[in-house]
Image (cartoon, rainbow, N blue to C red):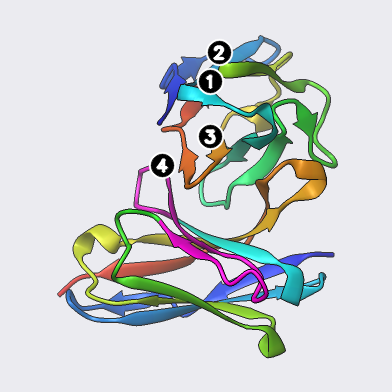
């Protein structure tokens, strides 16, 4: 089970966002990813292997963590970053966290 | 460039069946692993299932759909299918198809299609 917190994060452009993803048991950092979803759009891969940015993802996005605690950080929010973020673990089954909405 | 396109969604009655298609281009399809993920209206992402390449012979399903849904592939058409049976209102969702990237030992859903909407209603 992946538990994301907070459910909603209300911030302003330029602020720092810290999103948490906690797993119910220790997982390999190779199999932890983050996705961004804006309204009406498909999810988009941001980070894989806990900390590796996908091609074209700005460096204001960073991922970290190990074991059961993982974090997605957006250093300075831009307007297009207000979206829902999901963490994901590829294991025996694929699981997603419940999502964190980053709201203005 | 990797491209993914789902089709086949629509309105179906409870207890009915539907087949979704996922056309993939821009890679060696016969080596591709493909996953289905769904999203009910206003809800989060839920894993439906995964099919590995034919040589691996592995197909896995999420608990909510196991026994009702079947995933298959036709490598000659670069297409993966999701066969859905015994549908209920709880299966109403946008169904996404995604390529499973196994780059450098990290496994993740690298590229997603735009999704196709399935509505189960009488």
**Which chain is disc 1 placed on?**
A
Dot 4, crowdedness within 10 Å: few (<14), some or many (≥20)?
some
Queried whether the magenta region covers residue B44, the answer comes back as yes
Residue A64: image location, x then y, percent: 69, 17
User: Is label 2 in contact with label 1 (beta carbons under 8 Å)?
Assistant: yes
User: Height in image: A49 above or below B44?
Assistant: above
**Which residue carries the number 1 mark?**
A104
Residue sitting at the far top: A15
Q: Chain of mark 4?
A: B
Q: Which mark is residue A62?
A: none
Crowding at dot 1, Cα within 10 Å, few <14 / some 14-19 / many 20+, comes out as few
The segment highlighted magenta reads B38-61
Q: Report, in whole angstroms, how far the alpha carbon at label 4 lies from the one at label 3.
A: 8 Å
**Mark 2 crowd level (few <14, some 14–19, many ≥20, 10 Å Cα):** some
- Residue B69 image position (x, y, % from top left): 35, 71
Query: In the image, are marks 4 and 1 on the same chain?
Result: no
Q: Is residue A70 visible?
A: no
Q: How many marks?
A: 4
Check disc 2 and report the residue beneath it.
A11
Dot 4 and dot 1 residues touching (CB under 8 Å) = no
B104 relative position to B100: left or right: right
Asked whether disc 1 touches disc 3, contact meaning CB atoms under 8 Å apart, the reply is no
Secondary structure under tag 3 reads: strand
Residue B40 magenta: yes
């Amino acid at each position: 089970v992946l538990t994301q917190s907070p459910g909603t994060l209300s911030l302003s452009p330029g602020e720092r966002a810290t999103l948490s993803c906690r797993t119910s048991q220790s997982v390999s950092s190779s199999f932890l990813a983050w996705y961004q979803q804006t309204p009406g759009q498909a999810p988009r891969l941001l980070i894989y292997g806990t900390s590796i940015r996908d091609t074209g993802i700005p460096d204001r996005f960073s991922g970290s963590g190990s074991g059961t605690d993982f974090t997605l950080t957006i250093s300075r929010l831009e307007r297009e970053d207000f979206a829902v973020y999901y963490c994901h673990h590829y294991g025996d089954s694929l699981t997603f966290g419940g999502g964190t909405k980053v709201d203005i | 460039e990797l491209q993914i396109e789902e089709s086949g969604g629509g309105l179906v009655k409870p207890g009915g069946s539907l087949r979704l298609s996922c056309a993939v281009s821009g890679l060696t399809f016969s080596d591709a692993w493909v996953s289905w993920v769904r999203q009910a209206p206003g809800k989060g992402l839920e894993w439906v299932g995964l099919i590995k390449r034919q040589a691996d012979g592995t197909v896995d399903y999420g608990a909510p759909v196991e026994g009702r849904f079947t995933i298959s592939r036709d490598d000659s058409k670069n297409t993966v299918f999701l066969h859905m049976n015994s549908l209920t209102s709880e299966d109403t969702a946008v169904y996404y198809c995604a390529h499973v990237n196994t780059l450098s030992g990290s496994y993740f859903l690298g590229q997603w299609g735009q999704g196709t909407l399935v509505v189960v209603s009488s």
